[in-house]
Image (spheres, rainbow, N blue to C red):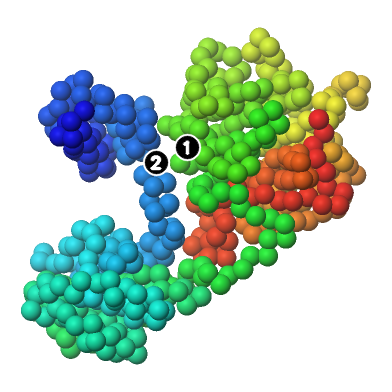
Amino acid sequence: MAVGEGTASLDKALCVLELIGGTADGMSNAGLLEVAGLPKTTLYRILATLVERGLVRRDPVKRVYRLGFRYLELVRNAYLQPDLVAAASVELRSLRDLTGETAYLAVLDGASVMSLERCDGAHSKRSSAALGQSKPLHCTGQGKAILSHLPADDRDALLRTISYDALTRHTITDRRRLQIELGITAARGYAIDDEEVVEGVRCVAAPIIDPAGKVRGALSVAGPAYRLSLARLELLGPELAEAGRRVGSQLAGNRTRIDSDGIEPVCQNWAFHGAFPCWSAQHGCLYWADTMAPAIRCFDGRHDRIIARLENPVAAMHLCGERLFVASGSERMWVSPKGEIEHIDGTSAWTDPSITVLCVDHGQRAWACLRSGDEAGCRVGPILDDGRFMTEWRIGEPVEAMVMTGDGTDAYAIAPDSGTLYLLKSAETAGNAAVRRVASMPKGSGRLSGLALDAQGGVWTGLKDGWSLVRFAEDGNVDTLKSLPVAAPTGIAIAALPDGPVLYVTSDRHLQSLELLGSAPWSGMLLRVRLTGHDSAPRS
């Protein structure tokens, strides 16, 4: 393909992306055909490629195209400060309300500064610099605020790479003069751009410094010079400095050390809500899901990767033989280890929305719970080969997780509403099916979440909002409590590895407060917990 043809194709794809991303409600096929001005076959080919790459997704209900969740992954991977925008959002609005002018959040981007967020001013004539736009360090208030608090060696290295171009007659073009101004900026806590980037526009900015002393970005207010006089900027400067300090105090500093106690994250990219970890001994890998930015992920011991992206939030996922059973929105599907999706059709228990698959036994038979609208509790039992659900036990409250015992006859289940761990005795072992309360945890300890059984017969569960894992012995007593560096564990899987058994733990991030994330930066990551002492591998 000629260079010109490739560029033209890229331009058409980017045009389609911008059209879809520029509408809050998405765009239909007809709307895109009308606005994009592309041949139908060309448009459909572009859409198919964008959907496959996760950059665009199709809303099956409204039948429109929207931006895909891949954008979220790209953005959060590009900026290792995923909480900075959230931390600054309140202060940006407050600065806008205080001044009536546009407020910005910017970060260092190589030898430039780049705007990440903007809160538009109240006036019809206002500053409106584009987000994502890079600007010079030496003449912007944001750049000078950041430079003034960088370590001396880093600052000097940047100053040597800058091209001191004059953008206006007020631009500083001399390195020594800039260093003097940076000293003044560091002493007073804020920087001023006196029409140095654009004639007739002034700006005041202050650095954002985290608890470890690292500068993470800058806040600024910009507007027409006739409204932002130098005298007014000097009055606003201390307000910007205080706002920057408040944002910085909410961020996790690099000096924060987590006492892992044998606990470590095994992936760099967090999930919004990690859940449903499934260990595959056959493939030596762990499958897990991000339920909110719907995707199925695979960790092979070294690398974590996405094998499938879905349209709707993941409601359930379990490993059945070599395939994953996945409930996503109203759809039920099989997903292969390569990410190939096969939708389940028909009217069996697999597709019944009132039935939730809880676990799979060693014979690859799925066990599920049935909740009816006229029942206070639920019924638990297997899904038979012909697709029918058979009731084995009746429990007076909903259960959310279940694990079969080593011999596959009995089971344990948790009911988070009451904090109860149940032992479900089968008719084969008890003469008749019976439900026995083994233990319960008070609500103050956290909400039971996830379930796994080790080789010693110990039952592991997480305590959501309790920052820990607990192990129940067979007599129902808690004999192990493991502290976690995350507040909300959501799922547990045990794996037998050559160097010893481990617990894999998924966790939630999107429901956690910004203040909490500062103390729990591993939230949403897949964690590996080394087991010692009486802890052992799962029964085979």
Q: Residue at x 34, y 79 (%)?
A: 156
Amino acid type at mark 1: Pro
Residue count near mark 1 (Cα–Cα under 10 Å), binned few <14, some 14–19, many ≥20: many
The residue nearer to you, when weighing 27 against 177, is 177
Quarter of the figure with residue 89: bottom left
- Which percent across, then down, holds residue 196? 15, 76
Quarter of the figure with residue 349: top right
The residue nearer to you, when weighing 331 against 37, is 37
Instruction: Give the quarter of the figure containing the N terminus.
Output: top left
The reply, left or right, for residue 275 in relation to residue 190 is right
> Of helix, strand and loop, which one carries label 1?
loop
Separation of residues labelled 2 and 1 (CA atoms): 8 Å
Residue 480 visible, this angle: yes
Q: Residue at x 35, y 31 (%)?
A: 51
Amino acid type at mark 2: Phe
The residue nearer to you, when weighing 374 against 151, is 151
Q: Is residue 333 above or below residue 385?
A: below
- Which percent across, then down, holds residue 524? 55, 50
Instruction: Give the quarter of the figure containing the C terminus.
Output: top right
> Which residue is identified by label 2?
69
Q: Are marks 2 and 1 in contact (CB under 8 Å)?
A: yes
The reply, left or right, for residue 386 in relation to residue 55 is right
Quarter of the figure with residue 4: top left
Q: Is residue 173 above or below residue 256?
A: below
The reply, left or right, for residue 528 in relation to residue 316 is right
> Which residue is identified by label 1?
294
Please identify the residue farthest to the top as the structure is shown: 386
Residue count near mark 2 (Cα–Cα under 10 Å), binned few <14, some 14–19, many ≥20: some
Q: Residue at x 26, y 28 (%)?
A: 46
